[in-house]
Image: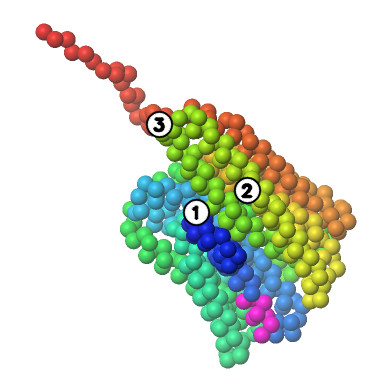
Amino acid sequence: MAGIGVRLNRIFEKQSIAASLVGFVYGSCITVAPMVLVIGVILLMEWLLGFDTLGYYARELFSCTVLYTFIFALLSAAPFNAVLSKYMQDAIFEERYQDILPCYYLGLVMNLSLSCLLGIPFCLWEHFVGGVGVAYVFTGFCGYVSLVMVFYSMIYLSICKDYGRISLFFLVGMGVTFGLALLLRFRAGWGITESMLFSLTIGFFLIAVLEYGSIRRYFAKNSNRFWPVLRYFKKYWHLVAINFFYILGLYIHNFVFWTTDMRMVVADSFVCNQPYDMATCLAMFTNISATVIFIARIEMHFHEKYKAYSEAVIGGKLADIQSAKRKMFREIAGELLDLARIQFIISVVVYLGFVVILPRYGFAGMVMRIYPCLAAGYFILFLMYAGILFLYYFNDMRGAVLTAVSFCVVTFLGSILSTHLPEIWYGLGVVAGSFVGWCIGYGRLRWVERHLDSQVFCKGNLIEHGKGLQPSSKVYEKALSD
């Protein structure tokens, strides 16, 4: 994210309304544009291809296929992304560029293996029990695997700060998806859902190929050293737990409501809860601007204070170190508060817009009754994630794990409880889980502030740990003169 922060800093330095607008648009395009682009293309295809003319079963089968593709592609990548990102960042810092491709290939095999372990049994069940055609099931599975590759390769391009290229690849892929869907439907005479699903699969695969080609362009040499990558999973298991429980917490409340009487089962395979899932989507988009604000206002400003503190530790006086430390943590508190203030204003405006506009387009009833509580929960959730990222800065892995696990567990338990409450309180599990996670994360930041001196100056090793013979305890030997 530092690459975005540098560019945004240059834009906002002009301190004008136009510069602020350009900075916000740039940050939005870099961070959330790919997902918005995919959703926009799907909606446009549905409109032009006459998706609403299909029967209820065909429409829900396609919608559930796309929903499951995105959710489980993210979940299957969650255990690997953070550790592989850490390994790649260390390799780049140490200028071991030849070790990047082994990391990429090994991580890809591990990610695809887990994805297939989850996807193949489900697809077999979908065909033999649900009665869905082989071609449709196989196309959906290929789209799922392609999206897994897309999400996985995005890690490497993000670390290379090539965010603009990611957005460009999504633009090309979704452009091909849209054009191919029109050709298959109106020229080849394919069915509506078949045209859309096959085109999405081709689009995702094209994005994955373009990302892979860009990675190979950055890193041409291959050292074939795979064992160091595996050792990172043992050394940094905290990152596996943090990322997995955070991603799981984002969807675990949906899974709970998929087990209630409101659930809908499609083809004896797909389970969903349309009102709750739609309200969740609206709540996420209500607060998604927090991602852009976090990049623009927190990382951009905090990086300078963090750099000043690091330089003071290396060569400054005690007074300079203490002063830089106080400024750094005041910056954290101030920027978190500003994030909450600005995002609250944006969320209120978006919420009012949704409440006024969406009922005119069929989004009413139970969806709008569930939506407010979930919107409040996602507002707190994004603040909590900002706290987790700050804990990364100070290498407080224990605090980050505790934050992510508590968020996931409390969200799960709270969602079970909220299923017995009125509809307006269905999102109470997300609110409770996010609030508990935020409190723990912020508490750990204050703990880090109190114990930062001991962590920086009292932990470390003069001699690197390793296996082998113990070094000699003899420091020097004085030779006696004749």
Q: Secondary structure at mark 1?
A: helix
Using the numbered discs, state the Cα–Cα distance from disc 3 to disc 2 in whole angstroms: 38 Å
Q: Examine the rendered structure and indicate whether residue 120 appears above or below residue 361.
A: above
Q: What is the distance, in whole Å, between disc 1 and disc 2 at their CAs?
A: 16 Å
Instruction: Name the residue at 44% across, 58% down.
Output: 160
Q: Is residue 393 visible?
A: yes
Q: Which numbered disc covers residue 2?
A: 1
Q: Which amino acid is tagged 3?
A: His
Give the image quarter of residue 69: bottom right
Within 10 angstroms of label 2, few (less than 14), some, or many (20 or more) residues?
some
Amino acid bearing label 2 = Glu
Mark 1 surroundings: few (<14), some (14-19) or many (≥20) residues within 10 A? some
Residue sticking out furthest to the top: 482
Q: Position of residue 336 (x, y in %)?
A: 65, 47
In terms of secondary structure, where does tag 2 sit?
A: helix
Quarter holding the C terminus? top left
Which amino acid lies under the numbered mark 1 shown in the image of this protein? Ala
- Check whether the beta carbons of the residues at disc 3 and disc 2 lie within 8 A of each other: no
Q: What residue would you read off at disc 2?
A: 335
**Image quadrant assignment for residue 12:** bottom right
Q: Which secondary structure is most common in the magenta stretch?
A: helix
Magenta segment boundaries in residue numbering: 41-48
Horizontally, is 458 left or right of 379 in the view? Answer: left
Per the image, the residue denoted by label 3 is 465
Dot 3 falls on a residue whose secondary structure is loop
Q: Which residue is at 69% across, 72% downward? A: 63
Q: Nearer the viewer, residue 158 or 453?
A: 453
- Nearest-to-viewer mark from 1 and 3: 1
Question: Vertical placement of 435 versus 12: above or below?
Answer: above
The reply, left or right, for residue 343 in relation to residue 120 is right
Residue 183: x percent and y percent? 57, 87
The residue carrying pointer 3 sits among few (fewer than 14), some (14 to 19) or many (20 or more) residues within 10 Å by Cα, namely few
